[in-house]
Amino acid sequence: MKSNEASLTSLISAFGRAYHHLFDTPIIFDDFIAPKLLSEQEFETVKKNMTKGISFFNADVAIKLKDQPDEILKWVTQVQLSPTPLARAAFCEKVLLQEVSLGVSQYIILGAGMDTFALRYPQLEDKLSIYEVDFPTTQQFKIDRLQESDLTLPSNLRFIPCDFTKNISTDFLFENGVKREKTFFSLLGVSYYLSKTELKQTLTSLFREMPEGSSIVFDYANENLFKEKGLSNRVENMVKLAAASGEPMKSHFTYKEMESLLEEVGLLIFEHLSPETIQSQFFNDREDYLKAFETVHYIHAVNK
């Protein structure tokens, strides 16, 4: 990751959540902190770039809405940018809160970016230790932005700088303050960029010394990733954008393949959401463009 990419990726992610909080109804995932993480200029810059990108995403829509910049922004954000990040965050945090009620004392966010969970749940400050694991440049950008926004870091939040896609283990986590206690991991928006071997190695390393009942939520692409075009070619666009950014998507799984991989690691699928289930749980009865991505699944897996 280049130093300038940390801020760009983080800002775009925060923009999607901020836009949803400010303009979408009903709310799927309410990150009310996200608007505070972007300056007015940054919000306008991302907004302008998203609007200018309409021709890449859909030439027909670009022509149809050429005189409606706000509608173009809504289309790009709701069709391409936001559906998966919003729904997977909603699913992950629902599972996390359930797990906290069942005794989880640690939450480790792999690839945290501009995550705001710790800021949105001050009531958990004395109950849940939160560790954000991410690239040093990304973490420093976030810390700087929180300070600039006059947002106070909660006492239960710790930052662990690390390229977790290449070097992560329970030993490394223990060296950085994590305890051998029942733990919940999130790995959102990452599995696509790992090979199947790399994903297996990562999960094996994470759970090697974690107690029974520790668990993880992550998303993955199904076997149609490189064949399915999706609504307005958005799946194809996602794959092309990843390749153009220098981080091509590497892996996809059938459900049986994923089940087998997790079993080899010692994890049991506790909950699995297909695109159809995600649509029914998070996107039904909407009157806007938001719909579940066609190739993305969510999993909650538990250490046996």
Image (cartoon, helix red, strand yellow):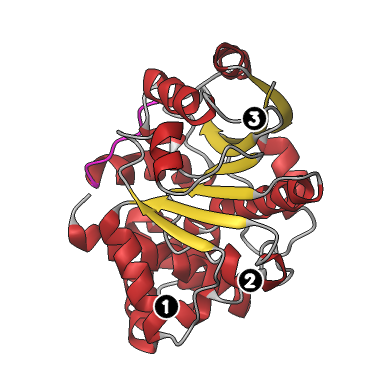
Circle nearer the N terminus (3, 2): 2
Q: Position of residue 131 (x, y in %)?
A: 50, 54
- Can I make out residue 67 in this image? no
Count neighbours of disc 3 (C-alpha within 10 A) and say few if under 14, some if 14 to 19, many if 20 or more: some
Residue that badge 2 annotates = 120
Q: Which residues are magenta?
A: 245-251
C-alpha gap between disc 1 and disc 2: 13 Å
Q: Is residue 215 above or below residue 58?
A: above
Nearer the observer, 200 or 281: 200
Q: Residue 180, position in %: x, y?
A: 58, 37
Amino acid carrying mark 2 in the image: Arg
Which quarter of the rendered picture does the C terminus lie within? top right
Q: Nearer the viewer, mark 3 or mark 2?
A: 3
Residue for badge 3: 211
Q: CA distance from mark 3 to mark 1?
A: 33 Å
Between circles 3 and 1, the one closer to the viewer is 3
Q: In what element is the residue under mark 2?
A: helix
Residue at image point 55% right, 43% down: 179
Q: Nearer the viewer, residue 292 or 171?
A: 171
Residue 89 falls left or right of residue 248:
right
Magenta portion: prevailing SS class: loop
Label disc, if present, on residue 146 of the rendered structure: 1
